[in-house]
């Protein structure tokens, strides 16, 4: 894989000339980081060190324009947008070294920086300058002075969209090239998942700035009218694991219908607090499976299924599923302080949601409308169809807006797009809507 990408980069960079360098100075989440909640934050940190440990990067703030697309006085309101640069591998003015620019997605740059290692891994080979840019309205790049003010109403939220984010990236990259006198330096943009979508769109919209793009795990075809028939919830597992997980939903439903059913399930899955509703447990388990498939952490799907299959010798179906929970999540001490438990209710508590989770809710209601559901009974997940009508009504009620769900760009990618690498791991549930598999997915949709 790396050899293939090296060849593509070489083709990109043949077009570059002399350069610079100076020293110093409920749509499942996309993103490169798994789903947030406060009680699992410490667990996530065990997989990624913080950027404070990386002395190679320096943090900068660009005075960004609020609105790039009209000339009303409020358009010229500014906010500080964060970006980070590493000069460590920069090859010098005569080396023809490129700029590798990572497009931040729906999380703070503090989180994404540590997970987005591909540009860092390849920078030494190409003597590249590294740039990581934070997405507007995330992390420290918040307009209007605070998150509360930025998300207060439709007027302030209206500047929170992908088109504005792309224009932000363009402004910052042009600023960097001007500041470093790097006018002839080729820029390659990178991104993962939603960030991969941004990277591809950036290459299409700003080809005079980006010589090429690497769009990793970018579900660009997961929109109404072009979404795959068998999509996100069709995870490949072992046959026995598939059967067990598929049966478990119905076993859970059977227990729920019993007297004190939620209490029984709470005890069986060692919930720290009594389950408020069965959907909370199901959401917790769905997140566990999709987290393993989409991020391969804390353990892989194969390892998860290995735990489930092995447990079949000593317990029933729900017991097998609990063994998987115990293998994935770190228990906490309950309120009585005398036993370990799992905070299953956490995903149902709005007070336990991270800021970026709430911001992503806005993006999915406005433009990132992906019809993710299980419409047929041939997935290991319990069927739950996606209703565009219900989704639109929910967004209208919550934000007072009508979502824009139609983004059919198949012909654009087939006939117009160039110098974009679309990479997909086939185990990633979102790969079903990847451009790299366009021909394959079209046959699957028939």
Image: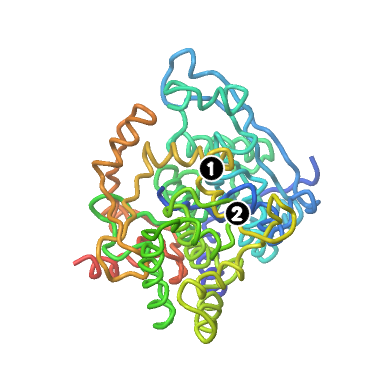
Q: Nearer the viewer, residue 344 or 67?
A: 344
Q: Where residue 438 appears, x then y in whole percent?
A: 31, 65
Q: Which residue is mark 2?
A: 343
Residue in the image at 62% along x and 23% along y = 145
Q: Secondary structure at mark 2?
A: loop
In the figure, is residue 295 to the left or right of 335?
A: left
Residue in the image at 58% along x and 29% along y = 147
Q: Which residue is mark 1?
A: 349
In the figure, is residue 129 to the left or right of 276?
A: right
**Dot 1 surroundings within 10 Å: few (below 14), some, or many (20 or more)?**
few
**Dot 2 surroundings within 10 Å: few (below 14), some, or many (20 or more)?**
many
Per the model, the C-alpha gap separating discs 2 and 1 is 11 Å
Which image quadrant for residue 424? bottom left
Q: Which quarter of the rendering shows the C terminus?
A: bottom left
Q: Nearer the viewer, residue 222 or 179?
A: 222
Q: Where residue 228 appears, x then y in whole percent?
A: 29, 61
Which image quadrant for residue 89? bottom right
- Which residue appears farthest toward the top when viewing the image? 73
């Amino acid at each position: 894989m790396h050899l293939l990408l090296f060849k593509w980069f070489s083709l990109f960079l043949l077009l570059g000339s002399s350069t610079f360098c100076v020293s110093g100075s409920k749509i499942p989440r996309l993103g490169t980081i798994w789903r947030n909640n406060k009680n699992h934050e410490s667990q996530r940190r065990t997989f990624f060190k913080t950027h404070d440990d990386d002395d190679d990067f320096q943090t900068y703030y660009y005075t960004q324009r609020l609105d790039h697309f009209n000339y009303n006085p409020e358009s010229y309101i500014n906010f500080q947008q964060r970006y980070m640069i590493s000069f460590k591998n920069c090859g010098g003015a005569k080396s023809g070294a490129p700029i590798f620019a990572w497009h931040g997605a729906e999380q703070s740059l503090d989180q994404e920086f540590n997970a987005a290692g591909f540009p860092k891994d390849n920078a030494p080979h190409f003597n590249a300058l590294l740039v990581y840019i934070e997405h507007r309205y995330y992390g420290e790049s918040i307009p209007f002075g605070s998150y509360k003010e930025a998300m207060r109403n439709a007027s302030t939220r209206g500047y929170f969209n992908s088109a504005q984010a792309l224009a932000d990236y363009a402004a910052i990259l042009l600023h960097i090239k001007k500041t470093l006198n790097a006018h002839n330096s080729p820029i390659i943009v990178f991104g993962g998942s939603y960030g991969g979508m941004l990277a591809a769109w950036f290459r299409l919209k700003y080809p005079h700035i980006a010589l090429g793009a690497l769009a990793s795990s970018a579900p660009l075809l997961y929109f109404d009218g072009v979404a795959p028939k068998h999509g996100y919830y069709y995870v490949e597992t072992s046959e026995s694991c598939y059967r067990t997980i598929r049966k478990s939903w119905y076993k859970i439903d059977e227990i729920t219908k019993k007297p004190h059913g939620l209490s029984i399930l709470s005890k069986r899955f060692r919930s720290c607090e009594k389950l408020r509703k069965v959907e909370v447990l199901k959401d917790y388990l769905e997140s566990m499976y999709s987290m393993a498939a989409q991020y391969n952490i804390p353990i892989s799907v194969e390892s998860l299924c290995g735990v489930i299959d092995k447990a079949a010798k000593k317990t029933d179906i729900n017991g097998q599923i609990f063994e998987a929970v115990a293998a994935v999540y770190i228990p906490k001490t309950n309120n009585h302080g005398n036993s370990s438990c799992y905070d299953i209710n956490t995903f149902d508590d709005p007070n336990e949601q991270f800021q970026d989770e709430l911001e992503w809710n806005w993006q999915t209601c406005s433009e990132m409308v992906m019809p993710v559901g299980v419409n047929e009974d041939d997935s290991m997940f319990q069927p739950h169809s996606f209703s565009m009508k219900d989704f639109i009504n929910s967004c209208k009620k919550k934000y007072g807006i009508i979502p824009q769900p139609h983004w059919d760009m198949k012909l654009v990618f087939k006939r117009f797009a160039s110098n974009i690498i679309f990479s997909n791991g086939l185990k990633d549930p979102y790969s079903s809507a990847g451009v790299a598999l366009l021909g394959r997915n079209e046959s699957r949709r028939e």
